[in-house]
Amino acid sequence: MATDSWVNETLYADWGQRFRVVRELARVQSAFQDIFLFESASHGRVMLLDGVVQITEGDEFVYQEMLTHVPLLAHGAATRVLIIGAGDGGVLRRVLQHKNVTRAVMVEIDGEVVRLAREFLPAIGGDAWDDARAEVIIGDGIDYVRTAPDGSFDAIIVDSTDPIGVGEVLFTDEFYANAARVLADGGLIVNQCGVPFMQADELRETSERRRKFFPVVGAYVAAVPTYVGGFMTLGFAAKATGLDAVPVETIRARAEAAGVLGITEYWTPEIHLGAFYLPPYIARHLPKG
């Protein structure tokens, strides 16, 4: 339906952003959330969940590349990857860009997100949906992690909404305890922890929970234009030390071997390492020691 109206994001009560809507594509009330897709005048196609921007065609590469390439290249030998959420398919596509990945399991609770993304955002997931290495499960990520065998994955990537509503259970002690169990030795987990300028509690509380189950807990940053408020933090927890400080040349060599060097729009080996150097206003929300 063609329109010339505006949509306001509802994430914050006192501050926000709006998009000029050129054309509404779909509006669906699923069993879990309100899903709204539209063509914007500035950012291409946009998906909102419960009034909050999840992805835009214009800048999705920043978040998706940093959420995917950083953990896989920090690990250096991840072949089995679990993705929780990420129903638009962008993380799955980038995980499968790594030639050494042999298995990528994606568990998304809301099948409508997957259906609508495949119909209206086809370039984001690309051919990943049909890759023989991919297993896409419409189901509860909490249940999947609860029952997965010990040591069955090398990396877990959580691409969820904020810890409210459907995404809340992905920020609990139970989830992180099971994530640590499911990860093999040397494994790691990443997840979005909000924009600390506006959501510092999210980073602080999530980091404190992860520290109960992982010896290494930290965060790195990405500048995503549509996640308003400055840097977005991506929480990082590992079962081995040193994965958050791998030298640039090592990361470059790993990226070349994996087949991802030179195909990114935001991630580079230098950005990878530099993203872990946090400004004080963010670093103070992480556990000390």
Image: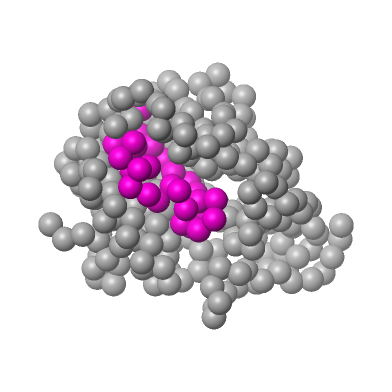
> What residue is rendered at 84% in x and 65% in y?
3
**Magenta span of residues:** 153-180
Quarter that holds the N terminus: bottom right
Residue 155 counted in the magenta span: yes
The image shows residue 254 at horizontal and vertical percentages of: 31, 33
Quarter that holds the C terminus: bottom left
The image shows residue 134 at horizontal and vertical percentages of: 53, 25
Extreme left residue here? 289
> What residue is rendered at 62% in x and 24% in y?
130
> What residue is rendered at 65% in x and 52% in y?
33
Extreme right residue here? 1
Residue 257 counted in the magenta span: no
Q: Is residue 157 above or below residue 168?
A: above
Q: Is residue 111 visible?
A: yes
The image shows residue 80 at horizontal and vertical percentages of: 39, 25
- Residue 116 appears left or right of 189: right
Q: Is residue 93 visible?
A: no
Nearest to the observer: residue 172 or residue 268:
172
